[in-house]
Amino acid sequence: MTQKGVGSPSSGSAPDLFYRRTLAAELRRASSKSYSAYLAYKDSRALNLTRTKEGIALLENRLALIFGCLSNPHTAQGKAGLDQEYTATIGELSALREQAAQAARSVGKPA
């Protein structure tokens, strides 16, 4: 014959009720923290997508400025440097667009 311990989950006493309430409160708190962490993670992915899109817009503006300088006949002397800058910016833009596509897939939105 086994003896029920005082305050154990099977005792049916006041400590048992306290134990169950404490456990339920801890479970609610843990699930609330998990859900909050999930929402923060989801928000950070959306923020990452927004930042990536802003970065793309900045690079596109930079490309437009470089292209404008390249097409200007008065900037012929620095043309080689601008060509390199244009090529590097195109590479950055391609990488950032791929990053935006991945971020959009993780958030579930079109890029």
Image (tube, rainbow, N blue to C red):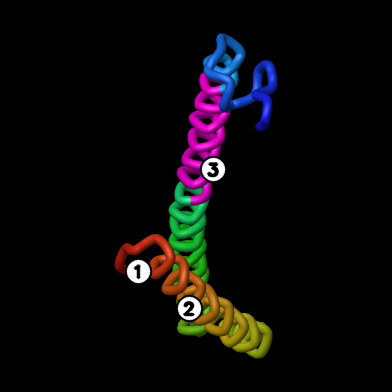
Mark 3 highlights which residue? 37
Mark 2 highlights which residue? 98
Q: Amino acid at mark 2?
A: Glu
* C-alpha gap between disc 2 and disc 3: 27 Å
Q: Is residue 79 left or right of residue 99?
A: right
Predominant SS along the magenta part: helix
* C-alpha gap between disc 2 and disc 1: 9 Å
Q: What residue span does the magenta drawing correspond to? A: 20-41
Helix, strand or loop for disc 1: loop
Q: Are marks 2 and 3 in contact (CB under 8 Å)?
A: no
Residue 66 lies, with reference to residue 46, above or below; the image says below
Q: Which labelled disc corresponds to residue 99?
A: none
Q: Most extreme residue toward the top, as rendered?
A: 14
Residue 15 location (% of width, % of height): 61, 13
Sequence-wise first label, 3 or 1: 3
For the N terminus, the image quarter is: top right
Q: Nearer the viewer, residue 80 or 20?
A: 20
Q: Amino acid at mark 3?
A: Ala
**Residue located 44% across and 53% down the image:** 46
Q: Amino acid at mark 1?
A: Ala
Q: Nearer the viewer, residue 15 or 105?
A: 15
Q: Magenta stretch: residue 64 in it?
A: no
**Residue located 50% across and 81% down the image:** 94
* C-alpha gap between disc 3 and disc 1: 25 Å
How many other residues sit within 10 Å of disc 3, few (<14), some (14-19) or many (≥20)? few
Mark 1 highlights which residue? 111
Mark closer to the observer (3, 1): 3
